[in-house]
């Protein structure tokens, strides 16, 4: 596949000696690129006019593999993001925002094993594109389906409206949600959720709330929809 050949060529040129020494054995960067293309195919979402595919891919590596990748990690991430662009373009698929690849460690994994979590990440500030990564400054709500992340919404505006209304920043296709159900606003470095007088109420970690500051991992339930709050 030409995308994978181009990936290996570009990566080899970008990190030359490091590439030859560090990647003689064990997990190979091209395995991550191959997984991205498979996840795009498996997680595509058919819209009215376009087919959307995930634009963020979080890889979890074993500790030894993460250590091997460390010196070249920035180049690997950059070239994997190019694989996302090329994979979508070649198949005529659309991305809701710029590609993002993150690499993390999972101590429970054995060397050579890895996990991949694909996500569609939208930015309510634009409705289409997401801004460049700003480590530690932003937060997001992650939509959970059957307990697994399926889509993420950046909290990039001072006030984010959640509800069934098509003009909401985060639109929920859920009969249990009111047209303007709740809002999340940024205040003094915190993110606060407030119910907007909804019919069925807003819950955080199974407790009904009127207004509450959100903490990492808090789960917001609106109707049957569950959104998890995460810092970035």
Image: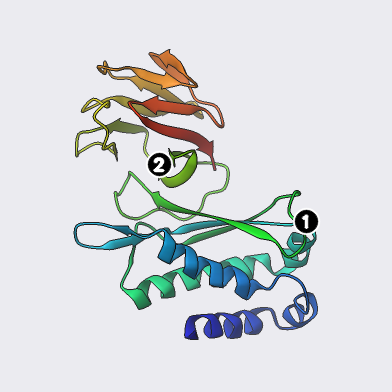
Q: Is residue 154 left or right of residue 133?
A: left
User: Residue 207 location, x and y as percent?
Assistant: 46, 15
Looking at the rendering, which quadrant does residue 61 occupy?
bottom right
Q: Residue at x 75, y 63 (%)?
A: 65
**Residue occupied by mark 1:** 63
Q: Residue at x 75, y 49 (%)?
A: 108
Looking at the rendering, which quadrant does residue 94 occupy?
bottom left
Which sits earlier in the primary sequence, circle 1 or circle 2?
1
**Residue occupied by mark 2:** 156
Towards the viewer: 100 or 59: 59
Q: Is residue 199 left or right of residue 137?
A: left
Q: Is residue 52 left or right of residue 5?
A: left
Looking at the rendering, which quadrant does residue 113 occupy?
bottom right
SS state under label 1: helix
Relative vertical location of residue 74 with respect to residue 169 in this rendering, above or below:
below
User: Residue 156 location, x and y as percent?
Assistant: 40, 41
How far apart are labels 1 and 2 at the CA level?
Answer: 33 Å
Label 1 crowding class (10 Å Cα cut-off): few <14, some 14-19, many 20+?
some
Foreground label between 1 and 2: 1
User: Residue 166 location, x and y as percent?
Assistant: 19, 39
Towards the viewer: 65 or 139: 65
Label 2 crowding class (10 Å Cα cut-off): few <14, some 14-19, many 20+?
some
């Amino acid at each position: 596949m030409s995308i994978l050949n181009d990936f290996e060529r570009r990566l080899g040129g970008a990190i030359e000696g490091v590439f030859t020494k560090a990647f003689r054995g064990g997990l190979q960067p091209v395995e991550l690129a191959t997984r991205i293309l498979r996840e795009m195919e498996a997680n595509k979402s058919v819209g009215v006019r376009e087919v959307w595919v995930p634009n963020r891919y979080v890889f979890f590596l074993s500790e030894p593999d993460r250590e091997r990748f460390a010196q070249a990690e920035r180049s690997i991430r950059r070239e994997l993001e190019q694989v996302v662009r090329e994979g979508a373009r070649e198949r005529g698929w659309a991305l809701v925002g710029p590609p993002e690849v993150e690499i993390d460690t999972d101590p429970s994994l054995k060397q050579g094993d890895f996990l991949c979590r694909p996500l569609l990440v939208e930015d309510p500030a634009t409705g289409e594109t997401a801004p460049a990564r700003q480590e530690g400054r932003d937060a997001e709500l992650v939509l959970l389906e059957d307990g697994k992340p399926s889509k993420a919404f950046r909290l990039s505006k001072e006030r984010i409206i959640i509800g069934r209304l098509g003009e909401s920043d985060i639109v929920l296709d859920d009969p249990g949600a009111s047209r303007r159900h709740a809002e999340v606003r940024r205040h003094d470095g915190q993110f606060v959720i407030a119910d907007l007088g909804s019919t069925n109420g807003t819950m955080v970690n199974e407790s009904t709330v009127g207004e509450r500051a959100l903490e990492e991992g808090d789960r917001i339930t609106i109707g049957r929809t569950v959104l998890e709050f995460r810092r970035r």
